[in-house]
Image (cartoon, grey):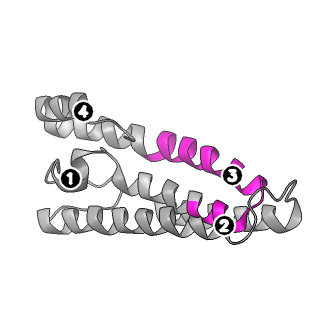
Amino acid sequence: MKRKPLLPPTYLAIAVIVMVALHFLIPVAHIIPFPWRLAGLLPLALGATLNLCADGAFRKAGTTVKPFQESTALITGGVYRICRHPMYLGFVLILLGVALLLGSLTPFLVIPLFAIAIDRTFIVPEERMLSRDFGPTWDEYREKVGRWL
């Protein structure tokens, strides 16, 4: 039986679990005191909003949101005008929010590791598929809009 690959939300859930575990098991230093930690609500809310907007754009276009499935449309409007991968950027913002809310040093270490894993596992192959499927239209979009910002 073929095992289903882990999807990006699972990577996000694992990253949050690791961050919380690091915070309680190896906090190293508490760098953000309360109530300043509540500032984490802002990137967390922004990341969730970015994900909802990006998901809505996929639904409106009638194309799949699942990685590695064939896209039937290249979405370049809305949040895709500022970032080629707003869902992944949203996940990074959510993790930043969680790290700020926790307030210790070690959870912040997870954020770049998560971004690298997402980039290598999903973004690079997805962009290869988009280039193959949408050719010059993709190339023009890619030149105008950054991968992350």
Instruction: Please state if 42 lies on the left or on the right of 53 as rendered.
Output: right
Asked if the residue under mark 4 is in contact with the one under mark 3, i.e. CB atoms within 8 Å, the reply is: no
Asked if the residue under mark 1 is in contact with the one under mark 4, i.e. CB atoms within 8 Å, the reply is: no
Residue drawn at point x = 27 percent, y = 45 percent: 82
Query: Which tag, 4 or 1, sits closer to the chain's start?
Result: 1
| Amino acid type of the residue tagged 3 in the rendering | Phe
| Amino acid type of the residue tagged 4 in the rendering | Arg
Instruction: Please state if 67 lies on the left or on the right of 26 as rendered.
Output: left
Q: Is residue 149 above or below residue 16?
A: above
Q: Which mark is residue 108?
A: 3
Query: Which mark is nearer the camera, 3 or 4?
Result: 3
User: Residue 70's spot in the image, x, y percent?
Assistant: 23, 52
The secondary element bearing badge 4 is classed as: helix
Residue carrying label 2: 37
Q: Is residue 41 above or below residue 63?
A: below
Mark 4 Cα-neighbour bin, 10 Å: few <14, some 14–19, many ≥20: some
Regarding residue 146, the answer to whether it shows in the image is yes
Query: Which mark is nearer the camera, 1 or 3?
Result: 3
The secondary element bearing badge 1 is classed as: loop
Q: Which residues are magenta?
A: 97-122
Residue carrying label 4: 142
Residue carrying label 1: 71
Mark 2 Cα-neighbour bin, 10 Å: few <14, some 14–19, many ≥20: some
The secondary element bearing badge 2 is classed as: helix
107 magenta-colored:
yes
